[in-house]
Image: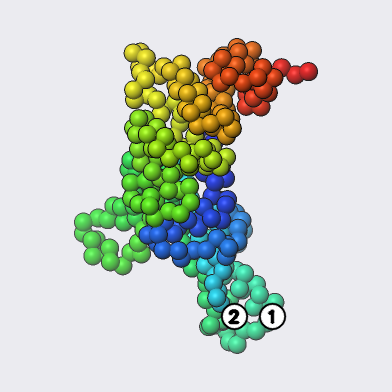
Amino acid sequence: MARDKDLAVMKFLEKPEHFSDLFNGSLFQGKQVLRADRLENLSGKSVLSFLDKEGDKVTVRRYRDAVCKASGRTAYAVFAVEGQGETHYAMPVREMLYDAMNYAGQVKILADKHRKAKDYRDSAEFLSGLLREDRLAPVVTICFYYGTDRWEGPLELYDMLDIPEEYEDMKPFIVNYKLNLVQASNVDPENFKTDLKHVFSLLGMASDGDGMKRYIQERPEVFRHISYDTFDCLRELLHTDAWWKADRNDGKGGVDMCKALEEIAEMAKKEGKNEGVRIGIKAFVEICEDLGISFEQTVKMVLEKFEVMPEDARGYVEQYRKTNVPRE
């Protein structure tokens, strides 16, 4: 399930307007620094090869979640996102390594270019692989934390270090690495221009089922026409079953999913007969499948609760059910 959540978020961030809005609304406090039309997707794969002291080749590979190159007037910058659904207690080191590998990759590209062009002017440039005037593109990485629990991990490299008391004087000379942690509790949703405004607003009230429902119901103009990517992202992040858990306890430490199904159906009816019904039926069918309700019984329940034609009910269940679908 964690993988489904990560994939939904990364799919959402594939849209340049969402990717740029994440940075503009969080790091830049709403200032429109990053423009969607200047973004170019980069491969998240980084490979670094070198020879160890025995002369053996060592290759290190890392994979980032989302990386884009942003063109400027004369140069470019690199922006990256690492998504986290749970606290990661080594995140500063992990992101520091990613950034370092990006810079190392830039150095290698420049060095290969100069060796091919044979334009080194002296031994210092030859040994460095760079010319004096060469510059690297800056890299900024966000740790996008979309878990519903509080982040409990370190916020910088210093938080991870155990410096002996007798060597405290060394701390000013240790290069620190600070995490650009972005989460619902440290951003202002109003700084975002896209559906990220609603993603962060709802994440901020993830433990308040009634509050989330009120938020949605008070904005029918938004949630009647919300995009598939946004809907899937919200559904994975907020967990529909957990949504009702606070006030729908069955008295046995579980969740009364029947009441949840009834509310999904009712919300879909109120939201209209088109997109709202489709979204409601999709969630309804998926929960029925999770509960082990048969295909035919699910078709019958969709007919009863959503007032659709029999052939439409069967078509919806065939479309949204993942297993045990009858074949002609």
Name which residue lies at 48% across and 41% down. 221
Query: Which quadrant would residue 46 be assigned to in this image?
Result: bottom right
* Residue in the foreground of this view, choosing between 73 and 81: 73
Whether residue 60 can be seen here = no
Q: Residue 155's x, y, as percent?
A: 34, 52
Residue that label 2 marks: 126
Q: Residue at x 66, y 75 (%)?
A: 113
Q: Which residue type does callout 1 highlight? A: Ala
Q: Could you classify mark 2 by the number of other residues whose Cα lies within 10 Å: few (under 14), some (14-19), or many (20 or more)?
A: some
Q: In the displayed orientation, state which residue is furthest to the right.
A: 328
Residue 117, disc: 1
Image side of residue 260 versus residue 17, left or right: left
* Whether residue 21 is visible: yes
Dot 2: what SS?
A: helix
* Residue under the point 57% across and 40% down: 228
Residues 152 and 264: in front is 264
**N-terminal-most mark, 1 or 2:** 1
Residue type at tag 2: Phe
- Label 1 sits on a secondary structure element that is helix
Quick check: marks 1 and 2 in contact, CB under 8 Å? no
Report the mark closest to the observer, 1 or 2. 1
Question: Quadrant of residue 244 in the image?
Answer: top left
Seen at 28% across and 66% down, the residue is 172
The crowd level at tag 1 (other Cα within 10 Å; few <14, some 14-19, many 20+) is few
Above or below, 179 against 134 in this view is above
Give the left or right position of residue 92, taking residue 273 as reference.
Answer: left
Please provide percent x and percent y for residue 323.
Answer: 64, 21
The residue sitting at the left extreme is 165
Q: CA distance from mark 1 to mark 2?
A: 12 Å
Judge left or right: residue 166 versus residue 123: left
Q: Quadrant of the C terminus?
A: top right
